[in-house]
Image (cartoon, coloured by chain):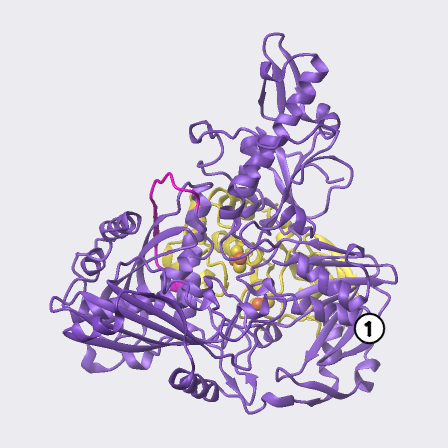
Chain colours: A yellow, B purple
């Protein structure tokens, strides 16, 4: 049994030791907002927060999470940073197909959480791990700035 | 019944509406007040739900925040794309095809609702007006909501030729609208095919023959079956599936398989062998003429200078962000498919054939798509899933790994192009010839393949119809089908041809010692729309402003999909050969604009998509196997490599043009031309080989 704290709730799941948090979220807990993109920590689609830090859930065995708090896209809007990012994402119409955007939003929320007013270089550094095949990057940059001004 | 969003924002639903009044094929109004609009095109990021809803809502006289949009079921008679005469989303056709039909459908529904209200009131319909989903009889102040008359309206005859609004009367079209599909995409609630949950569903991972054309000889599944949570091991001709309680255990099961493949006829295939065959075809093959105008041979004789070049483009994978997946439930009397597909009718037909069920017993539930780019125009992956799912009684979800998504893609063809021009003493082109050597993509979309000797226009699109007036021109195609399965890829024919045409035109300008924009302008007297976007981009980009050493600007111009686009890219090339993108400026005339903000977004994303491929991507083969597999070796442009992008839209009264692919087509030639301006090195092969740019003598 693996015990997890996700979005403020405690769960116990039966899962193989090497099962990544991504698949525990998606297939055992039905939290489908966190996406599978590459499985090898290259794209960021699976980004969640572990104790507030952005983490690639596709390479993190759920068994290694321990008592740390996991936050997913489903609950990030309850944090001020997440709510502001989501709002800015809609206002600037960042989203195209949307498949990468859970991960983008999680990475962006973590960024403005620790750096309330990032500049272009800081945004690029924090977001470079997140691929968007629709290439919404210019708007992501603008939306992070807009969210950090509020 | 679809739950109606209580918030002011409309949303895109993926479940179907079951009990409302259908007013024509596109409008459903439930008694509880939900107005649902049926989307004939699939939403894969291009913003088509919002644009098509805008066309319907404009004439129906409802606001976009009053409606729910959902995917059309497969039904070619109702939802065929008028330009393809098939229910498919691709080729930047959606708005071009549906511009008039959807407005007519909205207007017809509105007039039926008005007629029903007028009947109820015993007045003439002309005395009634509509606003935001209500019908008003102004002289008596009576008001009825659409849902109150929907049932009776649905029984009235559909007017044949409803009157459409003039452009001045538009309240939605032409004004930037908030997208209706995005609010669910920022909080994790949007449901893509990969997210589908069905009662009793199991999940499978697969192993596929590493060489296309290979067959499964035998598989030892003893170890896999011992893994707790593994439920079944299924076999088809060229693949094995391990079914598990969840995806991770299925993956573990696949890794525990011991498979013996009969690798088939393609094990000797390499990129070099494919190229050698193409060169042979170029030398010996019979060209199929696409266009010949003027006297080509005499013009070459009269020319003072002849310029020739050879260009090459690689196979490309689509690498959509959402990896390939399909969920299928086959029962003795029916089949359900949950998937995001650009080609629902074809998928349904294949499923019927594979299961032996009548087509009307196959229900396809189409979903939001996490990136299409053409990949989901073919249903091969859905066929595979049905072959597996028909072996089991439960619903089965199949998810491919990223590596499978790339290696077992159906690729954008590779191309070899031979191009030549004859110039007069001022350096102006007297004659232009362009020969493409490639496979045919269309044979994958035609019922009976593609006959020898027949032109696949896709191979020459963007070449025979360039914006320029050449006194003499010949465009032809040598068909050479490589043993690699092909597919359309964002920008289709023009992505390839415009790279060749615009790069070579740049070569001619430099040969003539002229400015590339001035050189193009001299060929555009008869093409004011192309001239206008070119002038706009030159001005906005500060074309003549000086730049640092090893920096340069490049331009491209094209007219495809009913739109005109000019692009300027500014680059700096380091001594090491590393390329930095500094600035991108686009000017686009796409006719009447539906949703200007989405148009900009499509150009921004489309350009970067094309740059990503030109900078990094080429699928190569060794021993029949695709050498790339994931984003580490099939790498994509990232935010830190993305420069600022400006998009300028020109006002126009022309019919709306397509947009999803326009920016992608512009990208590679503008980049190559910028690199030439910065380094003097001409890019004639993609992806760009940095080692060519690191030579010191070019500094
Ligand atoms: S799926 Fe985890 S980084 Fe791509
Ligand atoms: S919005 Fe489509 S991949 Fe980012």
Quarter of the figure with the C terminus of chain A: top left
Q: Please, is residue B146 above or below residue A141 in the view?
A: above
Total marks placed: 1
Answer few, some or many: residues within 10 Å of disc 1's Cα (few below 14, many 20 plus, some between 14 and 19): some
Image point 69% across, 62% down: which residue?
A: B347
Q: Is residue B650 magenta?
A: yes
**Residue at 66%, 83% in the rendered image:** B209
Q: Nearer the viewer, residue B516 or A64?
A: B516
Q: Residue lying furthest left in this view?
A: B425
Q: In the shown orientation, is residue B658 left or right of residue B689?
A: right
Which residue appears farthest toward the top when viewing the image? Answer: B140
> Over which residues does the magenta segment extend?
B639-656
Residue matched to label 1: B229
* Of B157 and A103, the residue lying toward us: B157
Q: Quadrant of residue B612?
A: bottom left
Chain letter for mark 1:
B
x, y percentage for residue B606? 43, 58
Using the rendered image of the protein, determine whether residue B679 is visible from the camera's viewpoint: no
Where residue B197 sits: x, y (%)? 76, 57
Could you tell me which secondary element the residue under label 1 belongs to? loop
Look at the picture and state if B624 lies above or below A25.
Answer: below
List x then y, in percent, for residue B667. Answer: 37, 62
The one of B209 and A77 positioned closer to us in this rendering: B209
Q: Depth check: give the residue in front, B610 or B571.
A: B610
Q: Can you give x and y, in whole percent of width and height, for residue B29 in the image? A: 70, 33
Judge whether residue B140 can be spotted in this image.
yes
> Which residue is painted at 72% across and 39% down in the image?
B3
Please say if A43 is above or below B212.
Answer: above
Q: Is residue A95 magenta?
A: no
Q: Quadrant of the N terminus of chain A?
A: bottom right
Q: Is mark 1 within 8 Å of ligand 1?
A: no
């Amino acid at each position: 049994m693996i015990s997890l704290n996700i979005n403020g709730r405690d769960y116990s799941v039966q899962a193989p030791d090497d099962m990544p948090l991504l698949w525990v979220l998606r297939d055992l807990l039905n939290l489908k907002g966190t996406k599978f993109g590459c499985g090898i920590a290259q794209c960021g689609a699976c980004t969640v927060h572990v104790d507030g830090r952005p983490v690639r859930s596709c390479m993190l065995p759920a068994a290694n999470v321990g008592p740390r708090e996991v936050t997913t896209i489903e609950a990030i809007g309850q944090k001020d940073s997440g709510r502001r990012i989501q709002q800015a994402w809609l206002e600037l119409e960042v989203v195209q197909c949307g498949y990468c955007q859970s991960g983008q939003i999680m990475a962006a929320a973590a960024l403005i959480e620790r750096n309330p007013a990032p500049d272009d270089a800081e945004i690029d550094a924090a977001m470079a791990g997140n691929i968007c095949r629709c290439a919404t990057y210019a708007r992501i940059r603008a939306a992070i700035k807009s969210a950090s001004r509020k | 019944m679809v739950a109606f969003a209580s918030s002011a924002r409309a949303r895109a639903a993926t479940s179907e509406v079951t009990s409302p009044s259908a007013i024509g094929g596109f409008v459903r109004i439930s008694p509880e007040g939900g107005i649902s609009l049926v989307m004939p095109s699939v939403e894969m990021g291009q913003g088509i739900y919002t644009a098509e809803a805008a066309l319907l809502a404009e004439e129906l006289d409802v606001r976009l925040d009053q409606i729910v949009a959902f995917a059309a079921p497969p039904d070619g008679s109702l939802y065929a794309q008028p330009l393809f005469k098939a229910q498919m989303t691709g080729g930047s056709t959606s708005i071009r095809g549906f511009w008039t039909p959807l407005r007519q459908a909205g207007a017809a529904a509105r007039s039926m609702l008005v007629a029903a209200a007028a009947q109820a009131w015993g007045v003439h319909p002309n005395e009634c007006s509509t606003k935001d989903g209500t019908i008003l009889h102004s002289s008596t102040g009576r008001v009825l909501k659409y849902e109150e008359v929907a049932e009776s309206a649905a029984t009235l005859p559909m007017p044949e030729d409803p009157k459409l609004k003039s452009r001045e009367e538009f309240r939605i079209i032409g004004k930037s609208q908030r997208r209706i599909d995005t609010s669910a995409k920022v909080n994790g609630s949007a449901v893509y095919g990969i997210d589908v949950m069905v009662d009793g569903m199991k999940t499978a991972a697969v192993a596929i023959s590493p060489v296309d054309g290979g067959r499964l000889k035998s598989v030892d599944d003893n170890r896999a079956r011992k893994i707790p949570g593994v439920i079944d091991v299924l076999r088809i001709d060229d693949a094995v599936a391990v079914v598990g309680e969840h995806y991770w255990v299925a993956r573990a099961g696949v890794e525990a398989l011991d498979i013996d493949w009969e690798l088939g006829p393609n094990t000797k295939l390499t990129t070099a062998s494919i190229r050698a065959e193409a060169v042979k075809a170029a030398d010996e093959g019979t060209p199929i003429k696409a266009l010949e105008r003027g006297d080509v041979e005499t013009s070459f004789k009269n020319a003072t200078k002849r310029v020739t070049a050879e260009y090459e483009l690689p196979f490309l994978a689509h690498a959509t962000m959402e990896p390939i997946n399909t969920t299928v439930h086959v029962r003795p009397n029916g089949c359900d498919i949950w998937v995001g597909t650009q080609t629902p009718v074809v998928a349904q037909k294949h499923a019927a054939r594979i299961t032996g069920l009548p087509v009307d017993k196959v229900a396809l539930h189409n979903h939001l798509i996490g990136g299409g780019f053409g990949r989901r125009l073919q249903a091969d992956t859905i066929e595979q899933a049905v072959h597996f799912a028909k072996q089991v009684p439960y619903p089965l979800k199949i998810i491919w790994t990223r590596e499978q998504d790339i290696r077992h893609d159906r690729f954008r063809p590779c191309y070899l192009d031979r191009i030549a021009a004859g110039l007069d003493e001022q350096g102006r082109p007297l004659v232009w010839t362009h020969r493409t050597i490639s496979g045919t993509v269309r044979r994958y979309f035609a019922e009976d393949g593609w006959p020898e000797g027949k032109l696949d226009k896709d191979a020459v699109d963007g070449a025979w119809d360039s914006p320029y007036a050449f006194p003499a021109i010949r465009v032809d195609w040598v068909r050479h089908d490589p043993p690699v399965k092909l597919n359309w890829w964002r920008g289709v024919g023009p992505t390839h041809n415009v790279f060749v045409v615009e790069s070579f035109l740049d070569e001619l300008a430099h040969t003539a010692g002229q400015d590339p924009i001035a050189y193009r302008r001299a060929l555009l007297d008869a093409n004011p729309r192309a001239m206008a976007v070119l002038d706009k981009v030159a001005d906005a980009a500060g074309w003549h402003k000086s730049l640092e050493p090893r920096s340069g600007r490049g331009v491209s111009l094209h007219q495809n999909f009913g739109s005109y686009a000019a692009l300027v890219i500014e680059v700096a090339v380091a001594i090491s050969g590393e390329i930095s993108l500094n600035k991108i400026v686009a000017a686009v005339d796409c006719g009447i604009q539906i949703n200007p903000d989405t148009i900009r977004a499509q150009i921004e994303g489309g350009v970067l998509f094309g740059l990503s491929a030109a900078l990094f991507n080429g699928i190569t083969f060794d021993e029949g196997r695709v050498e790339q597999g994931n984003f580490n070796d099939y790498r994509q442009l990232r935010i830190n490599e993305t420069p600022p992008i400006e998009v300028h839209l020109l006002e126009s009264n022309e019919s709306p043009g397509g947009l999803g692919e326009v920016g992608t087509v512009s990208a590679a030639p503008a980049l190559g031309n910028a690199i030439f301006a910065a380094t003097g090195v001409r890019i004639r092969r993609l992806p760009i080989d940095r080692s060519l740019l690191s030579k010191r003598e070019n500094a």
